Image: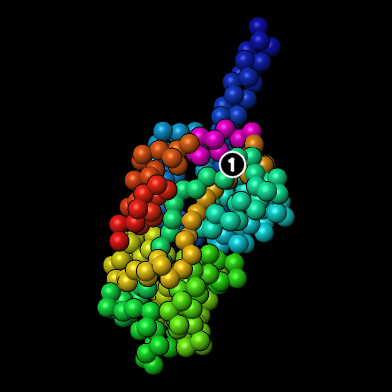
């Protein structure tokens, strides 16, 4: 009888451990910081036993890390090209799913960015302009494209300070290490940044679209939490969160 009880207790612990062990590690582009934090909280309300850890950074660096075997279960990229390359290399367990289009803005904590345009950046009073590193950060690439399209790149380039990702770029502006930054709209509309300064929306005809997409990586092929979270991203509540942070959703037109 004692043996049966021991087996039953062990079995119960095993089941409890298995339920607790359902964990998801997400690599997410830094523009998603505020939106993704909110999405995870909402997801966990209906999936309380699921553990979701999110690491934020630049899409290009995550792309490289996943190729090198980094232990990420899902990859949300600010440039859909990166997950497409991983899928083509056999490193995805799902199709590449578009989830949003991003926008770039001029934002400042010390200047009135609402009255600025890209041409304002050549003003001698503006000596430091922050953008994400175009070598690996999609928002940095689009910032460079917009400046080049406006014929301002050569004049503004000497003033540039580069963030490792778009969140660090915004931080440079927030702390005064740059007077103005070209940052993600999704960050500028967050209450913390919005309370510090306004923004000017960069016309999207000045740069390539910031189409964003995600994959479930090969290592998470049998991870049930990955499938549940992927399904949740397409839900009405999740789409409402993305819209709240200024993202344009697939199949919808930009509001401005």
Q: How is the image coloured?
A: rainbow
Residue at 60 percent across and 56 percent down: it is 82
Q: What secondary structure is marked by label 1?
A: loop
Q: Is residue 80 above or below residue 197?
A: above
Question: Over which residues does the magenta segment extend?
Answer: 222-230
Where on the picture, by quarter, is residue 92?
top right
Q: Is residue 206 above or below residue 219?
A: below
Residue 10 on image: x %, y %: 64, 21
Most extreme residue toward the top, as rendered? 1
Residue 15 on image: x %, y %: 59, 24
Of residues 135 and 146, the one nearer the viewer is: 146
The residue singled out by tag 1 in the image is 95
Most extreme residue toward the bottom, as rendered? 124
Residue 96 on image: x %, y %: 57, 45
Where on the picture, by quarter, is residue 3?
top right
Q: Which is the main secondary structure of the residues drawn in magenta?
A: helix
Mark 1 closeness class: few <14, some 14–19, many ≥20 residues within 10 Å: some
Magenta stretch contains residue 209: no
Where on the picture, by quarter, is residue 236?
top left
Q: Is residue 171 visible?
A: no
Q: Is residue 104 above or below residue 156?
A: above
Q: Quadrant of the C terminus?
A: bottom left
């Amino acid at each position: 009888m004692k043996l049966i009880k021991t087996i039953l207790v062990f079995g119960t612990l095993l089941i409890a451990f298995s339920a607790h062990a359902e964990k998801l590690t997400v690599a997410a582009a830094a523009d998603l910081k505020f939106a993704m934090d909110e999405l995870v909280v909402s997801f966990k309300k209906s999936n309380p036993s699921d553990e979701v850890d999110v690491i934020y950074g630049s899409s290009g660096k995550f792309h490289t890390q996943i190729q090198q075997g980094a232990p990420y279960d899902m990859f949300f990229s600010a440039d859909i090209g990166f997950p497409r390359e991983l899928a083509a290399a056999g490193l995805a367990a799902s199709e590449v799913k578009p989830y949003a289009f991003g926008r770039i803005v001029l934002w400042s904590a010390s200047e009135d960015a609402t009255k600025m345009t890209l041409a304002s950046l050549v003003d001698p009073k503006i000596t430091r302009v922050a953008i994400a590193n175009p070598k690996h950060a999609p928002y940095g690439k689009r910032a460079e494209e917009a400046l080049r399209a406006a014929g301002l790149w050569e004049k503004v380039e000497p003033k540039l300070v580069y963030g490792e990702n778009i969140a660090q770029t915004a931080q440079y502006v927030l702390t005064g290490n740059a007077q103005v930054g070209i940052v993600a709209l999704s960050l500028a509309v967050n209450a913390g940044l919005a309370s510090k300064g306004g923004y000017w929306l960069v016309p999207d005809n000045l740069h390539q679209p910031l189409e964003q997409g995600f994959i479930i990586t090969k290592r998470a092929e049998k991870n049930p939490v990955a499938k549940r979270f992927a399904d949740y991203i397409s839900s009405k509540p999740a789409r409402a969160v993305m819209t709240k942070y200024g993202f344009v959703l697939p199949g919808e037109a930009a509001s401005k």
